[in-house]
Amino acid sequence: AVLQGLYHTAPVLLAACREHRSSAGAAAGTGSTPSRGSSGGNAWGLMDANHRSPCGAVGGCFHCDMDAMASTCLEPRPSWEEGKEVQLTIGDRVRLHSLGAKELNGQEGVIEGPMPSDLSAEDARIGVRLTSRKVAVRPSNLIFCCRSAAGPSEMVRWLPKLGEFNFGTQEDAHEFLRSLLRLVEDEELRTHAEALRRAGPSGEAGVPAPNADLTAAPSRLFGGLLVSQCTCTNRECASSSFSFESFLDLSLDITEATDSVEDALRLYTAPERLDKKNGWKCEKCDQVVRARKQLTIYAAPSLLVLNLKRFRYGGYQNKGTRPVSF
């Protein structure tokens, strides 16, 4: 679901992966579209006999794998047409049409095996699992809807490189997305550092600028800026202090009063009163005072990622199931 979300909402990120793979492959003399059927330890078979990715990275390149994964698992395939190659496969979601049994037309289902060896044959039939039954129809009676999801095994090889992810442990989609973006950023910074090294004096290490991470694709697409404003409640003072913090996503609390994402955002940016127990030191008053604190979005990102915090501590029901509209 996370990868599908990136494909549909952040095509620029996957386009950058494709550009990286194509340009690096051309520079290395391997071409822009290496064969996926070649041998290698990579889930998509992109590494050569020397365990190098199309970009030349030893041991695999996440950018190259992301592009291959997108083209094999995420990009929509054309529906079947007379005279053209059939590309349907087990797990694809399809819609039935032009059947004699008109009550089946328009229904959607999932292709189940076994698949006929020759889909263009006159007697070729494909099994489709509908909600209540399974039917066998000609390929010409199917309209492709979407591909089957990529299997978890295709990401297992990269789990150790995703930081806190370990095979067999339980993590959520938010942690997976953050780890994935961090890996993309790390590879971009390493590539940038290597380019600086090659451009600099012989043997001199390339050192990116201190804020080079802000120019990487994850920050350009998902990076925003929060501002925290604390205001002294003393009438004679009423001075304010501002602090800024960058973010890639926002984690929103889901409560019994939260019916929509808008409600959760209003709760996130609601003013908070700081009393003597958790007071704020006003520089103008030079003492700890009661204050009003509010967190707001100062600069919105191109793509805003929201994490709905449904898990709660204690009790028998640890995960909230309240519907949240958006």
Image (cartoon, rainbow, N blue to C red):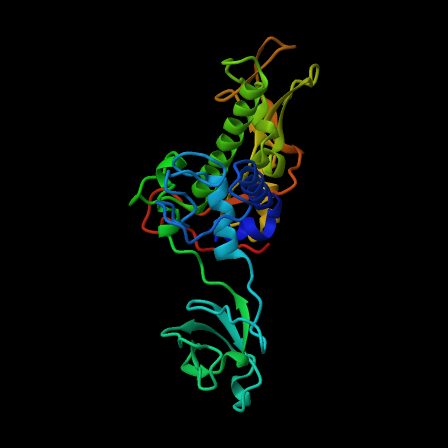
Q: Quadrant of residue 98?
A: bottom right
Q: Quick check: can you spot residue 2?
A: no
Q: Quick check: can you spot residue 22?
A: yes
Q: Position of residue 173 (x, y in %)?
A: 44, 46
Q: Residue furthest left?
A: 168
Q: Position of residue 168 (x, y in %)?
A: 29, 45
Q: Position of residue 59 (x, y in %)?
A: 38, 36
Vertical placement of residue 99 versus 86, above or below: below
Residue 127 vs residue 8: left or right? left
Q: Quadrant of the C terminus?
A: bottom right
Residue shown at 61% from the left, 39% from the top: 221
Q: Position of residue 199 (x, y in %)?
A: 59, 19
Q: Quadrant of residue 314?
A: top left
Which residue is nearer to you in this view: 245 or 155? Answer: 155
Residue shown at 43% from the left, 40% from the top: 175
Residue shown at 58% from the left, 24% from the top: 212
**Picture mark count:** 0
Q: Residue furthest front?
A: 29
Vertical placement of residue 44 versus 241, above or below: below
Residue shown at 49% from the left, 63% from the top: 147
Which residue is nearer to you in this view: 9 or 136? Answer: 136
Vertical placement of residue 322 versus 208, above or below: below
Q: Residue furthest top?
A: 286
Residue 286 vs residue 125: left or right? right
